Image (tube, rainbow, N blue to C red):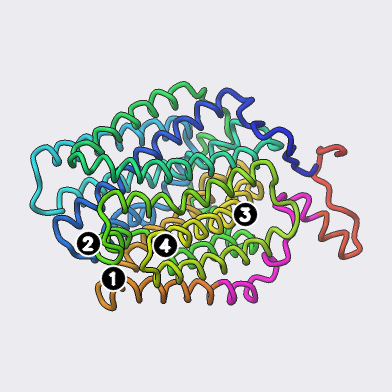
Amino acid sequence: MQVQVQAEDRFAAFRHRAFAFYFVSRFLSTFGLQIISVAVGWQIYDLTRDPFDLGLVGLIQFLPALVLILFTGAAADRFGRRTIMLICELVIAVAVAALVWFAWRGLTTPLPIFAVLLLIGIARAFFAPASQSLAPNLVPARDLPNAIAWNSTSWQTATIVGPVAGGLLYGLGAMAPYLTALGFLLTSIVAISLVPQPSQRNRGQAQSWQTLVAGFSYVRNQKIVLGAISLDMFAVLLGGAIALMPVFARDVLELGPWGLGLLRASPGIGAIGMAIFLASRPIRRHAGRSMFIAVGLFGAATMVFGLSTSLPLSMAALITMGASDMISVYVRQSLVQLWTPDELRGRVSAVNMVFIGASNELGEFRAGVMASLIGPVAAVVIGGAGTLAVALAWSFGFPQLRQIQSLDKDAEDSRAALEAGMPAVEKPGSGTA
């Protein structure tokens, strides 16, 4: 049966109480982490004035997801996903409390902050696959694309308000953003505690090497999923400019913390608009082609941002980047969630999160290193050009992804079978649409 999202019911996922609490928890935790990311970046750059240290912020948070990948996804499939989220949020709250302490005592070196970021990175490594794979357990399949769109909206809303709040709060002192973030995280812990523990397949299953690497095997064999997550990874790895925004705000555009907040919020403005649009008008045709066009537009807008010396133009470029990236995120997340069996969803999500981490945190490290060697403007412009090259290369390397129409695997299999002159593929026990 083809999964449909009714355009007239934009809030289908919220008809399910468990998802509503889950949504609130993810929003608040993301909001808090966005505040922290701005405050940490500004505080470290104030201490060292070295773009390389901003790159280290991303690298430190990415490494745990990479090192622990065989265990984080397996944990999400073996143990209660809601429980894992709760434990991870408790750990992050403790880490933020440490940042409050450091801000109160004052720092002359970023090393204690790096240590706390490592702890946050470890918690996020377990949190991400558990939280991503929990959503399909809280809503029926017909409402999952709507839930994915609203989850993306939640994240993007936090990335709009969070950075602005972080920049403004940092103007009141280093403690203010960390205390605010701690309050959001504590409220998030309450919200996730109200989510009932749902049933999930293979929970408590004994682990073996085959089960640990099952996520890798599935992604490798599903060329469309592999192409989608690798395209997004390399595109953002090369085109990401988030880590350098303190440099652009202070040195290129000559703005203060408020300007950094505006720059950090701009991609989210574009993304949330696109996410709301996709929640009511999901992509039903030409999904693969839409993803490639969006990635190309992301690269072009990145180049414009790198060359801009005007705040309005920079914000416009970043808004375009956010909107185009949202299309890529929507397609990738839908493919991972809808094409993956529930018993593998945690491990596949862990692989996906490493790809995302490589594109985001490792991309920040790439940007910081390049900026320290050739300057921030050249680093961003060259990265945007690299993103365009990746979109072109992947369009030839993964023709299956470029040609995909529907994000629903059963519908896409049936379409491919009909085009090949074979009987339509029907999911056993699915009945008639």
Judging depth in this view, the residue of 244 and 346 nearest the camera is 244
Residue at image mark 3: 331
* Disc 1 from disc 4: Cα separation: 22 Å
Residue at the location (31% across, 53% down)? 260
Marked residue nearer the N-terminal end (3 or 2): 2
Circle 1: element type = helix
Residue at the location (15% across, 60% down)? 48
Judging depth in this view, the residue of 167 and 96 nearest the camera is 167
Q: Do the residues labelled 2 and 4 touch (CB within 8 Å)?
A: no
Per the image, is 394 magenta? yes
Q: In which quarter of the image is residue 199?
A: top right
- Identified by mark 1, the residue type is Val
Q: In which quarter of the image is the C terminus?
A: top right
- Identified by mark 4, the residue type is Ser
Return the mark for residue 308.
none
Q: Give the range drawn in magenta.
A: 391-413
Residue at image mark 2: 53
Q: Quadrant of the N terminus?
A: top right
- Identified by mark 2, the residue type is Asp
Residue at image mark 1: 369
Circle 2: element type = helix
Residue at image mark 4: 314
10 Å neighbourhood of mark 1: few (<14), some, or many (≥20)? many
Marked residue nearer the N-terminal end (1 or 3): 3
